[in-house]
Image (cartoon, helix red, strand yellow):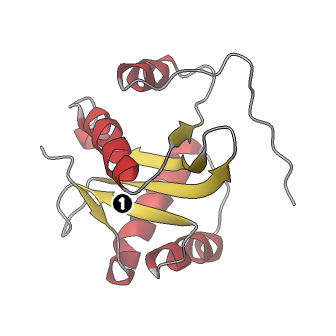
């Protein structure tokens, strides 16, 4: 099975929203249809703050990832943050997420991104192993903190 990445376009909105809904339900992320649409639609329309990539065949994607962008003095320029990564349950454990996490940084590096970050649930050992396999390292001196506005 191919983990080919395709930059999602406005015509992919329904496919992306179906995947986002499935991911949010699985992870128990509280979000409404309207909030998901409001978050995804501008990314598909080309807002420069992020991008959505479909994983697998564009007609019937098997997953998606959302990358958002910011500026980092520490890393010397634009950095990215994997906001969401989802692979459909029936095709998990086949190396697809590993392929995504190997090819995505290469693609982003070619576009000038200096560092790529992600967040992981502390107790999720499977994800820790996946991210370590693809050379993501915990930042020992740093912990993400959030303030909702």
Q: Position of residue 6 (x, y in %)?
A: 26, 63
Q: Going by the image, does 80 lie left or right of 106?
A: right
Q: Going by the image, does 93 lie left or right of 108?
A: left
Residue 74 in sight in this render: yes
Q: Position of residue 140 (x, y in %)?
A: 68, 16
Which residue lies at the image location 23% right of the left edge and 40% below the top edge? 91
The secondary structure type at the circle numbered 1 is: strand
Residue lying at the far front of the rendered structure: 76
Residue at the disc numbered 1:
53
Rendered view: 132 above or below 88: above
The quarter of the picture where the C terminus appears is bottom right
Residue lying at the far left of the rendered structure: 1
Rendered view: 22 above or below 81: below
The quarter of the picture where the N terminus appears is top left
Which residue lies at the image location 44% right of the left edge and 46% below the top edge? 85
Q: Going by the image, does 99 lie left or right of 135?
A: left
Which residue lies at the image location 34% right of the left edge and 46% below the top edge? 104
Q: Which quadrant of the structure image shows residue 130?
A: top left
Residue 87 in sight in this render: no
Q: Nearer the viewer, residue 37 or 104?
A: 104
Q: Nearer the viewer, residue 139 or 100?
A: 139
Q: Going by the image, does 147 lie left or right of 131?
A: right
Disc 1 packing (10 Å; few <14; some 14–19; many ≥20): many
Q: Which quadrant of the structure image shows residue 9?
A: bottom left
Q: Which quadrant of the structure image shows residue 53?
A: bottom left
Which residue lies at the image location 36% right of the left edge and 26% below the top edge? 134
Q: Position of residue 127 (x, y in %)?
A: 46, 26
Rendered view: 98 above or below 5: above
Q: Position of residue 146 (x, y in %)?
A: 81, 44
Q: How many marks?
A: 1
Rendered view: 149 above or below 114: below
């Amino acid at each position: 099975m191919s983990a080919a990445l395709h930059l999602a376009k406005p015509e992919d909105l329904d496919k992306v929203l179906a995947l986002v809904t499935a991911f949010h339900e699985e992870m128990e992320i509280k979000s409404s249809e309207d909030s998901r649409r409001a978050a995804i639609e501008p990314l598909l329309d080309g807002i420069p703050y992020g991008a959505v990539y479909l994983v697998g065949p564009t007609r019937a994607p098997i997953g998606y990832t959302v990358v958002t962008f910011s500026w980092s003095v520490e890393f010397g320029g634009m950095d990215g943050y994997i906001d969401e990564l989802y692979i459909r349950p029936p095709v998990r454990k086949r190396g697809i997420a590993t392929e995504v996490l190997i090819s995505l940084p290469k693609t982003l590096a070619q576009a000038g991104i200096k560092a790529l970050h992600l967040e992981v649930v502390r107790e999720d050992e499977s994800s820790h192993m996946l991210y370590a396999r693809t050379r993501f390292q915990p930042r020992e001196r740093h912990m993400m903190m959030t303030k909702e506005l």
